[in-house]
Image (spheres, coloured by chain):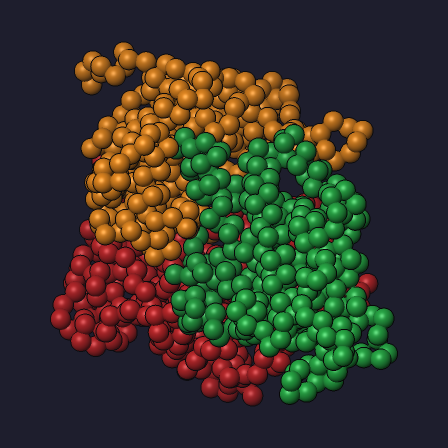
Chain colours: A red, B green, C orange
Amino acid sequence: MVNVANPNILLDVQNLGIRLNTSRGPAQAVREVSFSLRRGETLGLVGESGCGKSITALALMGLLPDSAVVSGSIKLEGRELVGLPDADYCEIRGNRISMIFQEPMTALNPMHTIGRQIAEPLRRHKGFSAAAARKEAIALLDRVGLPDAGRRVDAYPHQFSGGQRQRVTIAIALACQPDLLIADEPTTALDVTIQGQILDLIADLVAERGMAMILISHDLGVIAENVQKMMVMYGGTVVESGATDAVFSRMGHPYTQGLFRARPRLGARKGTRLKTIAGTVPELADLPTGCPFADRCPLVESRCRAAFPAMVRVGGDHLVRCVRTDVSMANLPEVLGA
Amino acid sequence: MSTPDTAISMLALAQRPATGFWRRALRHRSFVVGGALVLLVLFAALLSLVWTPWSAYDIDIAAKLKPPSSAHWLGTDVFGRDIVSLLLVGARATIAVGVIAVGIGLSFGVALGLLAAARKGWTEELIMRMSDFTFAFPAVLSAIMLAAAVGPGMVTSITAIGIFQIPTFVRVTRASANAIWSREFVLAARASGKGAFRITTEHVLPNILSVLVVQATIGFALAILAEAALSYLGLGTQPPQPSWGRMLNEAQTLLFQAPSLAVYPGVAIAVAVLGLNLLGDGLRDLLDPRLARER
Amino acid sequence: MMLDPTQAAPPLVEVTDLVQRYTLPRESLFRPPAQVHALNGVSLQVKARQSLGVVGESGSGKSTLARLVMALERPSSGTVSLSGRDLNAMAVDELRRARRDFQMVFQDPYGSLDPRQTVARIVAEPLTALSRVGRADMRERVAAVLRQVGLRDADMDKYPHEFSGGQRQRIAIARALITQPKLIVADEPVSALDVSVQAQVLNLMEDLQEQFGLSYILISHDLAVVDYLCDEIAVMYLGRIVEQGRPEDLFAHCGHPYTRALLEAVPRARAGGGRRRRGAQAIASQSQSTAGCAYALRCPLADQRCRELAPALRELGPGHLAACHHAEAVMALPPVAAEG
């Protein structure tokens, strides 16, 4: 069933909500998350620990625990994924939607050769024979820039460096030519000079194969340089979204501004103190009513706590979930200049 | 970055909402069943101190090999002794051997294991090779040699079994202790100036306790089996002290006339060992620090 | 900049020609086991009340340097001196007492605190390691230092798992402060923390430095963090210092191609960012020792001389050193684009 209204839309997420049982009671881990992706589009999810970005990614992959309650809709080319039985989801994972993770060492099985791990999705989803899969694995290793692929296909993960292992996980993720690639902090565990290479590689492959990509990171710099559009998440919901350039030129949400200001910057004037965001990230089970950022926001008012704010359009596709965008955006020169 | 850890730990929390050791323990099937069986054996041993239906030592040839009746609930053995009473008193020997033998294994084994992990180098090599050597020696053989030297009896069997338990505890302790020594908080303790002994007692030991407890329950089960085997061979508890192992031995000659004589002590041993194994499995799950360390 | 009295005094920390080699397990009976050259002759100084940042990637030797400065390992050769006293020449007891003056903060806020101990015991550990301390006295000192790092007295009876990453790092800093040390070696203290928490901890570290006249040796892979907190930065590559100087010097006109590569690799959070092509290759193995410059394999400026002769650390300007034959050429390049 193709979505006839918008045949170009690959992934359409509407009002996604995820409830989890935590030790402190039920928690709304993700709330009112909506976005869509066309083929070839890249989306960045940025936020700190506990904001819900990784859980959103797991929801797209159908990897949430059985006790999770998912509301809303996730449509892959018109097909509804929420509530899909696991057996059907297995056909999709690694095949139509692939994921790469932060820690390449734990994402790879130390007891299998990398060739076997790359061949696994090929044999499972595409029915390749062992010989054909091996040939394709070598071609993939070559494409991801691993030198001497023909010999190293039989090597074990521990024989590679961190950056090389991440290239292997990329090869595994791309083996079946998925439509959507989800990269969850793919370079956080790598050296900074390697990070750029890996991100370049991912970007090249995404463009080459016309895939859509969701890149998850806590690093604003990585997001700024690698995705066309972005969403900032806090307390389980999207607080700001829009084209990357638009968001970075005119940050509307106080949290985005706070995050931007809290980064130590290279070459900053000496003696400038880092402007922190007061307080700490709340437990998802203890979120305040109304705006999740209310307890820490410098611009908070009574109406912020009264109701969950709706998204406000501040320009084009640029949306901000805040009732005080007039003030926050007036503060911009100070935010960006500092 | 802690992000995926937070997501994954949130999911872990989502699957295990109950906190508190005893609440979780009482939901854990292995733990509950194993615990019940072990308590049963314990109860039998304690009960035998104050009361048994008949005396376990009185011989009454006239009443030998009687089937179960209202007087003798499981019947009598070849000497006319009440089987229920024999089982109850025999439980004492079982528990005594288990506790003391494991105690020996635990105290020496853990001490040596901790020493090996703390010192490394030649000390570690020496301790591990000694424990390999002890391990390689068949337990029964060493029990026989010991019995030949000092005479058979409960003390002999306890000593032999205890010595045989030591290498296992050395291995398990050393492996777990090594894992703790490589943790960063131990490095922090060293950076504060703490010496190896204090680090071992204050940091290493508390963090490996759960592993040791589990190993002790397993050791207990093995000790009971070993005691039964030794008694069967006549090297353990001596007559007239009742012992489940010796009951098996005596039942052997009458296997076709009165097979139930072998069944009762066999079931008793099985119950004790099964109970301890299940308890150990349960404890292993419940004391896993990853499960306890939720936030 | 009048006469600085601290200039005349001996440096607080002095590291001279530090070399550290580790022997790997034997792979074959017939060949000698391979060796990892973690440090290949590192010398540096830290003055009282000053901070030195050590930047490098995996394999640079920065964590090894931290461990050697903290006398947690013995070097293969070279000396580490604190206030003029050689740490490795001291008797065990003397070294233990000397540890009062230098403490460490570790990277992993989840691993550096014993999960089975209360915060009070954890924070008091440097005290209890040195001498017997009365319980009331200990609790008082713990409470005082917890307040200094922004935690509450009541927190001292809780367990680590009840705290967030940023709070645990504060506990770790409290533990490092309790003996009133002169030097704190911080190994990636904020790498595992969220950005907003990182900012809080960095501000705290800055405040503590001012308040107590501390010196830091801050190890990090993050140039921005080191730039923020430190008076001097040393860039390490494969066990050697390749450049050293004040943050302004390094940023405005760095003298080593590796420093430049690091600066260029940092992603910039700004509009119109777009992807910049980066061409650096993987780091060479620590087991091979090359005759020439260790960076030659990756360096765009490398020539025959670089491959044959290892450059020595030489002065390019006041307090600015670099180990590169082409340092002047690197300095002449346009400055790396700043952020925002």
Residue C287 in sight in this render? no
* Percent x, y of residue C163: 33, 55
Q: Is residue B98 left or right of residue A315?
A: right
Residue C84 in sight in this render? yes
Q: Residue at x 47, y 78 (%)?
A: A67
Q: Residue at x 28, y 69 (%)?
A: A287
Above or below for B104 versus B283: above
Residue sitting at the far left: A302
Above or below for C270 versus A100: above
Q: Residue at x 27, y 25 (%)?
A: C49
Among the 4 quarters of the image, the one containing residue B191? top left
- Given residues C36 and B139, the one toward you in this image is B139
Among the 4 quarters of the image, the one containing residue A93? bottom right
Q: Is residue B66 left or right of residue B272?
A: right
- Given residues C96 and C270, the one toward you in this image is C96
* Percent x, y of residue C187: 42, 37
